[in-house]
Amino acid sequence: QVQLVESGGGLVQPGGSLRLSCVVSRSILSDYGMGWYRQAPGKQRDLVASIDTSSRTNYAESVKGRFTISRDNAKNMVYLQMNSLKPEDTAVYYCNRVYLKWPWGQGTQVTVSS
């Protein structure tokens, strides 16, 4: 059973930055495209950034130019660098495969507020 553990969230002022990390419990990360998702209260969970096995990336329009997804297969890690944060980025952030999801982790809360 693969486990996902996200970390790095917190409270940040508008315009600030955070770097989220996701560790995958097994050394299989290189086989899969991965994504970062977010879920705000009362809203559905949406994909905001993805990275395929060749490290090609895609972003939702709402985060394009501000967020950067990356991966380190040797460390079983996926990262999300978030810059120029806005209040509307407030959500719980999760990582998972793009297709055929593994069980979701607990996520990490990101709150953007002054």
Image (spheres, grey):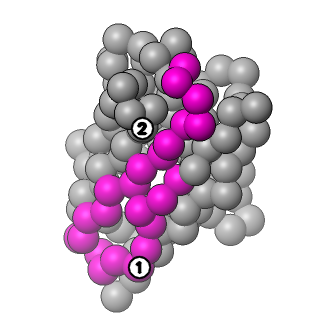
Point out which mark residue 99 bears.
none
Q: Where residue 87 appears, x then y in whole percent?
A: 42, 72
Q: Is residue 36 placed above or below 8 in the rendered structure?
A: above
**Numbered tag placed on residue 78 in the rendering:** 2
Q: Is residue 112 depicted above or below 33 in this figure?
A: below
- Horizontal side of residue 96 vs 15, given as left or right: right
Q: Is residue 38 magenta?
A: no
Query: Which of 11 and 65 lies nearest the eye of the viewer?
Result: 11
- For this orientation, the residue located farthest to the bottom is 114
Q: Residue at x 29, y 41 (%)?
A: 68
Q: In which quarter of the view is residue 93 placed?
A: bottom right
Is 22 covered by the magenta stretch? Answer: yes
Instruction: Residue type at mark 2: give it.
Output: Val
Residue that carries the numbered disc 1 in the rendered image = 11
Of the pair 51 and 46, the residue shown nearer to us:
51
Is residue 87 visible in the rendered structure shown here? yes
Q: Viewer-nearest of labels 2 and 1?
A: 2
The boundaries of the magenta stretch are 6-28
Q: Quadrant of the C terminus?
A: bottom left
Q: Is residue 59 visible?
A: no
Is disc 1 placed on a helix, strand or loop? strand
Residue at position x 46%, y 17% in the image: 30
Q: Amino acid at mark 1?
A: Leu
Circle 2 packing at 10 Å, graded few (<14), some (14-19), many (20+), is many
| Residue at 42 percent of width and 50 percent of height | 21
Mark with earlier residue (2, 1): 1
Q: What's the CA distance linking mark 2 and mark 1?
A: 21 Å
Q: Position of residue 38 (x, y in %)?
A: 57, 52
Image quadrant where one finds the N terminus: top right
Q: Residue at x 59, y 37 (%)?
A: 25
Position of residue 60 measured from the top left corner of the image (x, y, whole percent): 44, 38
Is the residue marked by circle 1 packed among few (<14), some (14-19), or many (20+) residues within 10 Å? Answer: some
